[in-house]
Amino acid sequence: MSTTLQDLVNSAVFLSTEMQSHFGSLIAEATWEVDFTADPQLTFSSDGTLVLRGRPHLLGSESQGTWLWGWENINDFPEPVVDLSHQVRRFGAGEGVAELTTAELELDDELALRLTLAAKAATGKWAHYPAAAGAGTTVWLLVDAPELALPAPQVKTTVRALMQGLTLTTVDDHRAALEAYVARRAIPTAVLPEDGIRLLFADGSADLSFDEQRRISNCEVQAPLEGEAAEQFVQASAGAPSPEAATTPARTAAPEPAATTATGTAAADQEPIQAAARVEERPTPVRGQESRAEAAPETAEPMEPAATASASTPTPASASDEAPAAAPGETPAETAQPAEPGSPAGSPAEAAAAAREEERPADAASPEESRAAAEDETAEDETAEDETAEDEAAEQPEQPKKKKGLFSKLFGR
């Protein structure tokens, strides 16, 4: 059976999410500049101080509702700029993934991100940056930099990556996605009853259960690490491979003499910019992180050589703004359970009944003797509580929509 684009998305989504969160924390408030010469460089700086410099790999560009793979190279960029995109094409040909071997694709709201996730699974490069070139065009880059090596896995960051990853795009097999992530990060695991999985970390553990459709149905976090989980961690981690193996950026080849220059700076605030490049059929981009919901489609203009522009990267949003993440282990046992849409979290009537049960004296009447009275009281309580809830809902003002944080912008959504 051939690999599908969805299989690659499942495989990459959680590690990519963790990496993008780490990447965003490093470049907050920084402006960027990209140099598409034979020695490609992506530089982030703040107030004239270098924040991070990495090697960019041009995957592809999106403009006017279409995606163009970098290996098509209509702008004749030097080979070091587009060589990784050729690796993605070869991988797609070998695995039978048509989306990776078709030069131009019609975009939907998520396809650019999904193609980038697939490219990460194909290349082992886990950081990406959607660079805004202005005029509605975005260049999607994979990025190498020593600073992007992830630290050892921790229960808090891992659980957050799982919960955030499930909100970014469609993941149709949560279990397969988790298993791919655990293998790449070398996270020790233990088997739980009913086919659950316990993830083990030096600072805690996370017990995950799944439903019949292999979706994560519950995630219970325990911190600090203790008891049975601590013993399992010691046993499972003995001789385990380094978790850095899958995330350390590869060394790049020595730079060649400069040929064609394509430089530009762009920013996440969506100001149109110009980027240098020689254009034959359509402009090749360099754009920041504009939300598709906010970006008005414009006709891309050819980019003139040696044009530059700059803009700033927004401050990373807090975890609560970024995505609904399970609460990390601030208490010994916490539970983060993805709720089904529209499912209640427990009715007021149930809470009232529980409270009455706790307050009942030892010599109270038996359940058989008081059942009828309790049912009457519960019905009256439910009626009163429903009326109160309706009144409060009517008085509650409409909540403003939250703005996208750096995490969302870094993903290009």
Image (cartoon, helix red, strand yellow):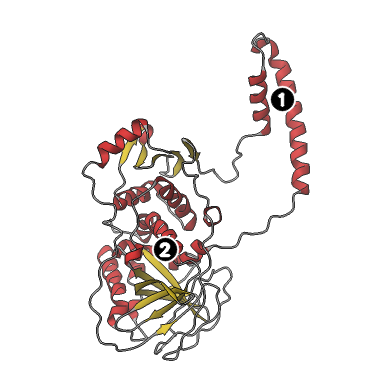
300 up-or-down from 152: above or below? below
Secondary structure at numbered mark 2? helix
Secondary structure at numbered mark 1? helix
Residue 258 point in image, percent of width and height: 29, 88
The foreground one among 199 and 176 is: 199
111 up-or-down from 191: above or below? below
| 180 lies left or right of 109 | left
- Badge 1: few (under 14), some or many (20 or more) residues near its Cα, within 10 Å? some
Residue 202 point in image, percent of width and height: 34, 42
* Point 25% across, 36% down: residue: 235
* Point 72% across, 55% down: residue: 398
**Any mark on residue 278, and which?**
none
The foreground one among 105 and 230 is: 230
Q: Which residue is mark 2?
A: 23
Q: Which residue is mark 1?
A: 378
Task: List the single residue furthest toward the left.
Answer: 239
